[in-house]
Each structure stands twice: as structure tokens, then as C-alpha cells.
Amino acid sequence: MAANTFLDQIVGLIMLVIASAVFLYYTIWTLLLPFVDDSHPVQSLFPPRVWAIRVPVILLLVGGAVVGSFLALVMIRSQQKKALKAKQKAATEKSK
């Protein structure tokens, strides 16, 4: 049990470091880079600024589609289970 907790902590730390790095990169890209001259070498480390809007919009659309698909799948399966139970109940009442 203790080894599992340690592994969870390591995975959590790695996820925290990655999320912090992405946040720092995106913050520099969107908030600080517009004030840096276009000919500066730092500009080559970042994609064009138009992608600062496109990337989050694309991620939101894909994430919304995934969540919506998951919810639709769960609702469809739930409805199928209810229909099957109703069919079984009707069959048992008919046989009595």
C-alpha cells in the first residue's frame, strides 16, 4: 500500500511540473511576447500569436465533443438497460 502511495505522489508531481511548465510557456507567449521586438531571437521559440487563440479553442471543442459523446453513450446504455428490464418484467408477468 505504501509503494502505491509513493507512486501516486511521483505521478502527481510529474503532472504538476508539466502543468506548471505549460502554464508558464503559454503565459510568456501570450502576455510578454507582444512587447518583444519581432526580430528578437526569442520570437523563434514560440509559434505565431494567432495560435495562442486557436489552440485553446480547438482543445475546448475537442474536450466538449469527448464529454458530450461520453454522456450520450452513458445515457444510451442506461436507456437500453431500462428497456431490457422492462421487457424482462413484462415477460415474467405474462408467464404468470
Image (spheres, grey):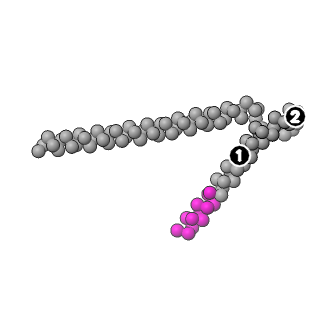
Residues under numbered marks 1 and 2 in contact, where contact means CB atoms less than 8 Å apart = no
Q: Residue at x 33, y 39 (%)?
A: 80
Say which residue label 1 marks. 23
State the residue lying farthest toward the top.
50
Q: Tell me the kind of residue under disc 1.
A: Phe
Q: Is residue 40 at least partly visible in the picture?
A: yes
Q: Tell me the kind of residue under disc 2.
A: Asp
Q: Is residue 44 at least partly visible in the picture?
A: no
**Sequence order check: which comes first, mark 1 or mark 2?**
1
- Based on the picture, tell me whether residue 48 belongs to the magenta stretch: no
Question: Is the magenta region chiefly helix, strand or loop?
Answer: helix
Local secondary structure at mark 2: loop
Measured as percent of width and height from the top left, residue 76 is found at 38, 37
Give the number of the disc on residue 7. Answer: none
Q: Residue at x 76, y 35 (%)?
A: 47
Measured as percent of width and height from the top left, residue 61 is found at 58, 33
Say which residue label 2 marks. 37
Q: Residue at x 72, y 49 (%)?
A: 21
Residue 84 lies left or right of residue 18; in this view the side is left
Measured as percent of width and height from the top left, residue 56 is found at 65, 36
- Based on the picture, tell me whether residue 11 belongs to the magenta stretch: yes
Q: Residue at x 57, y 35 (%)?
A: 62
Which contiguous range is marked in magenta? 1-12
Q: Is residue 67 above or below residue 12?
A: above
